[in-house]
Image: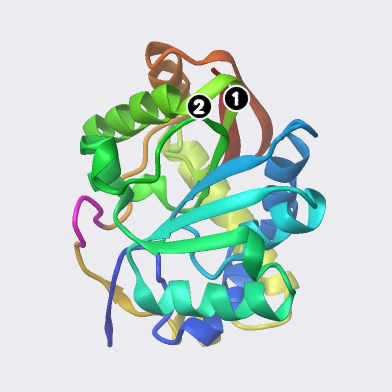
Amino acid sequence: MQQLFPGEVFAKTADFDTGIRQLLPRYDEMLAVITHCLPVTTHRILELGCGTGELSLKILQRFPDAQVIALDYSPRMLQFAETKITAAGYQHRWTGMEADFGEWADNSSKLGIGSEFDACVSSLAIHHLDDQMKLKLFQQIATSLTQGGYFWNADPVLPESPTLAEVYKAAREEWASQQGVPLTEVRAKLGTSSTQGYSSQDQLATLETHLHMLTASGFKTVTVPWKYYGLAVFGGSR
């Protein structure tokens, strides 16, 4: 199988948008929650790990004045996202940058993207960092937001017990079967992830651990607006 950066998931980028919807329950609903939790005054947005641009697209559709700076270390994901954003006519409000947000967490000045963001968002990306780097990233995000700015993250979380791990797994398998495509067929399109920069294969933390990290990083109103078994949207305001 082809070696992939963490987060690329599928051997062919073109398989991602369809495949992830077959593998992850309520994927579109999860991303929509992030867009609905951003204030209407949100203008300047930083996205960490933009992938194929699905979250960017939803944000640009919902906020006609928004400007998105999107980071991803995968050139093929960025190219795919840029093509999609351009086709939708939003290219003048979207900037894709090939960058590792782990490096940004270590040294925010390195990328030259500045701070004073009204919001920071991420989906299916931060769980590739170990917990120490997650905390460092949350701290960096907090200092890069305007007062009252929001951070929302959509990610899988570590099951709280072995019993719940089985429950979450069954929910995902039931979802996949409801899509009418055998899981074996979807999994045949997967690739094998290799470490890239600060990211590695899944390094999940419990939802409680994430919330404690956010509070320790200075976020207020830390909350979970959406959760479906092992997937959650969580975050807070600066």
Question: Hey, what amino acid is under mark 2?
Answer: Leu
Q: Which segment did they paint magenta?
A: 196-200
On screen, 159 above or below 103?
Answer: above
Viewer-nearest residue: 13 or 43: 43
Residues at discs 1 and 2 in contact (Cβ within 8 Å): yes
On screen, 122 above or below 173?
Answer: above
x, y percent for residue 6: 32, 63
Provide the residue designation for mark 1: 149
* Left or right position of 181 against 142: right
Q: Quadrant of residue 104?
A: top left
Point out which mark residue 145 bears: 2
x, y percent for residue 156: 49, 46
**Quarter that holds the N terminus:** bottom left
Q: Mark 1 and mark 2: span between their CA atoms?
A: 5 Å
x, y percent for residue 172: 60, 59
- Residue for point 36% across, 75% down: 75
Q: Secondary structure at mark 2?
A: strand
